[in-house]
């Protein structure tokens, strides 16, 4: 059975611009103080929204909470081993260091950076970290159970068909290369959530045959 835990997206400035999770326990992103994190909460919130928002919510009926956003930027950090800001920095540091080691060992390290060594993933006994770096320097880190095979095609699909379509091509997208801005696009979040759930079901069903 394939389990996808979470995804981090970092921009070219090494800032985490998007995070969400699907299979993490005891997280302030999935359980807010005094509020159960189930579909009824999401549906109750959606009932009071506009028709356009209801259309977006219909894309995914079981929405995980995302970070960073104004809705969850300050609450619940004590329920995590680390505050989200520190966790994101730690994850990026691990991926960045491993990528650089792979580049050096492959003899393809250079001042231009990037991922010429072809670092794709590494595994521990509890998880596997999958890494994809776009030509524009946007970095995608997907954490799964340690037995999951390569997710390079999945990450490339997320970049080309979801990130580019719903973030880069969004008229409200700020293309200023000197600044960082979190992804707060509901369509991006909804399509990504549905895609992850679909591929998890597909991979699991294929493995059980």
Image (cartoon, rainbow, N blue to C red):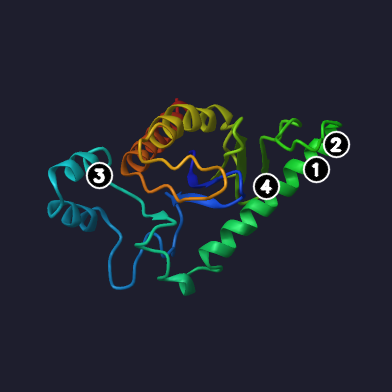
Query: Between marks 4 and 3, how big is the CA–CA gap?
Result: 32 Å
Q: What element carries label 1?
A: helix
Query: Between marks 3 and 1, how big is the CA–CA gap?
Result: 41 Å
Q: Tell me the residue that label 2 is attached to.
A: 105
Q: Which of marks 3 and 1 is nearer the N terminus?
A: 3
Q: What element carries label 2?
A: helix
As drawn, the label of residue 95 is: 4
Query: Between marks 2 and 3, how big is the CA–CA gap?
Result: 45 Å
Q: Do residues under tags 1 and 2 come within 8 Å of each other at their CB atoms?
A: yes
Q: Which of marks 4 and 1 is nearer the N terminus?
A: 4
Query: Between marks 4 and 2, how big is the CA–CA gap?
Result: 15 Å
Q: Tell me the residue that label 1 is attached to.
A: 101
Kindly report which numbered mark, 4 or 3, lies closer to the viewer in this rendering: 4
Q: Tell me the residue that label 3 is attached to.
A: 61
Q: Do residues under tags 4 and 1 come within 8 Å of each other at their CB atoms?
A: no
| Label 1 Cα crowd, 10 Å radius (few <14 / some 14-19 / many 20+) | some
Residue 18: give x, y in percent of width and height.
Answer: 47, 49
When the figure is inspected, residue 5 is found, relative to residue 36, above or below; the finding is above
Q: Do residues under tags 4 and 3 come within 8 Å of each other at their CB atoms?
A: no
Residue at x 51% of width, y 43% of height: 176
Q: Is mark 3 on a helix, strand or loop?
A: loop
Q: Do residues under tags 3 and 1 come within 8 Å of each other at their CB atoms?
A: no
Q: Is residue 101 left or right of residue 68?
A: right
Query: Between marks 1 and 2, how big is the CA–CA gap?
Result: 6 Å
Q: What element carries label 4?
A: helix
């Amino acid at each position: 059975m394939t389990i996808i835990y979470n995804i981090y997206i970092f921009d070219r400035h090494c800032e985490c611009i998007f995070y969400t999770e699907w299979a993490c326990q005891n997280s302030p992103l999935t359980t807010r103080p005094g509020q159960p994190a189930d579909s009824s909460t999401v549906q109750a919130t959606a009932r009071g929204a506009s028709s356009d928002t209801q259309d977006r919510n219909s894309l995914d009926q079981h929405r995980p909470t995302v970070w960073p956003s104004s809705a969850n930027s300050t609450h619940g950090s004590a329920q995590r081993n680390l505050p989200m800001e520190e966790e994101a920095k730690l994850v990026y540091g691990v991926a960045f260091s491993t990528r650089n080691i792979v580049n050096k060992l492959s003899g393809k390290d250079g001042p231009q950076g990037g991922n010429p060594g072809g670092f794709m993933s590494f595994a521990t006994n509890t998880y596997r970290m999958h890494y994809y770096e776009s030509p524009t320097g946007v970095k995608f880190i997907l954490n799964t159970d340690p037995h999951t095979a390569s997710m390079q095609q999945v990450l490339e699909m997320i970049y080309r068909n979801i990130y580019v379509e719903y973030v880069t091509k969004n008229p409200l997208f700020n293309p200023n290369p000197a600044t960082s801005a979190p992804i707060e696009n509901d369509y991006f979040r909804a399509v990504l959530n549905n895609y992850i759930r679909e591929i998890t079901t597909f991979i699991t069903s294929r493995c059980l045959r």
